[in-house]
Image: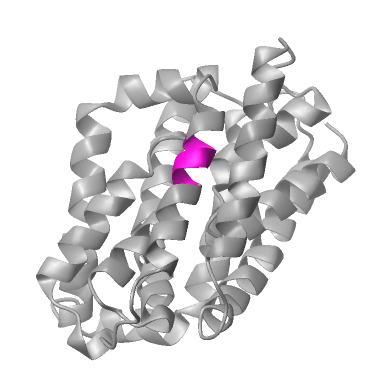
Amino acid sequence: MSWIEAFVLGLIQGLTEFLPISSTGHLALGRHAFGLQEAGLFLDTMLHIGTLAAVVFYYREELYGILKNPLGKVSLLLVVGTIPAVVVGYLFEDFFEEISVSGATIGWEFLATGFFLWFADGMRNGRKKMQDLTYTDALVIGSFQAGAILPAISRSGLTIVGGLIRKLDRETAAYFSFLLSIPAILGGIVLQSTKLLEGGGAAGSVGIPALIVGSVASAVFGYVAVRWMIDFLKRGSLKIFAVYVWALGLVVLGAQFLGKW
C-alpha cells in the first residue's frame, strides 16, 4: 500500500466516522477502488486510533470532568448508552463479521441509513440539552447505536436520529452522539487488538510510513468532521446526507447487479 492510498483511507475514516454516512461502508468502497481486498487489520486499528484521538481531543474537558467524577451523571449516561451495542455485538459477533466481510448488503444498508436520516430531519425540533438527558434517553440512543454494527449503517447517523426522536435539540443530539462514540471506538480498537494478538491480522504489506500517514489523516479529518457536524446541525438539514447515501447505495447495488462488486 502506498502512503497516498493510506492517506485517502485515513481521510475517509476521519470524515465518515462523524458524518452520518458510515465509515465502515466507505472504507469498504475505498479498498475496492484501490483493489485492496484486505488492507490489514492492523491498518484498521490504526485508523480507528486516529479518530479516537480526534474525538478525545475535542471532548478533553468533558473527559477530564468524567475522570474527576467517574460516578457522575455523564459517566453513567455513557455506560447506559453503551450497553445495547455491547450486548448485540457479543451475541451476534459472528453474524455481523460475516456480513461485514462479504459486503453483500452494503448497498441496502446505505439506503436504510438514508431513510432514517430523512425521517429524523422531518421531525419537530426538540429542546432538550445535555443537562436534560435521562437514562432512558441514553438507552434509546444506545439501542440505535447497536443497530449500526451493520457495516454501512451509520453509527453517528443512527445515534443522532435516536437523539432527535428523544426530543434533543440538533446540536445536543450530535454532541451526545460523538461523546458516545468514544467507548464505541475504544471497544472496537480493543476487539481488533485482541484479534491481532491471536494472529487474526497483521500489518502485512502496509508499511510504517503508510500507517503513520493514515492514522494522522484520520485524526486530523476526524477532528474537522466533529467540529463541522455539530455546527452544521444548528442550521443544516440531514436530508443532504440522505440523498447522498441513497445515490451511493444505488450505485453499489448497480455494481453488484453487473457483477462489478
Segment colored magenta: 109-113
Tell me where residue 21 appears, x and y as whole percent.
56, 52
Q: Position of residue 258 (x, y in %)?
A: 72, 12
Q: Is residue 28 visible?
A: no
Q: Nearer the viewer, residue 211 or 80?
A: 80
Q: Quadrant of residue 24?
A: top right
Q: Position of residue 107 (x, y in %)?
A: 56, 30
Residue 119 is situated, as x and y percent measured from the top left of the image, at 39, 59
- Residue visible at 60% across and 35% down? 42
Observer-nearest residue: 39 or 261?
261
Q: Tell me which residue sits at (26%, 61%) in the image.
A: 141
Question: Is 111 a magenta residue?
Answer: yes
Q: Characterize the magenta stretch by its predominant secondary structure.
A: helix
The image shows a total of numbered marks equal to: 0
Residue in the picture at 45% in, 79% down: 59
Against 75, is 27 above or below? above
Quadrant of image for the N terminus: top right
Dividing the picture into quadrants, the one containing residue 242 is: bottom right
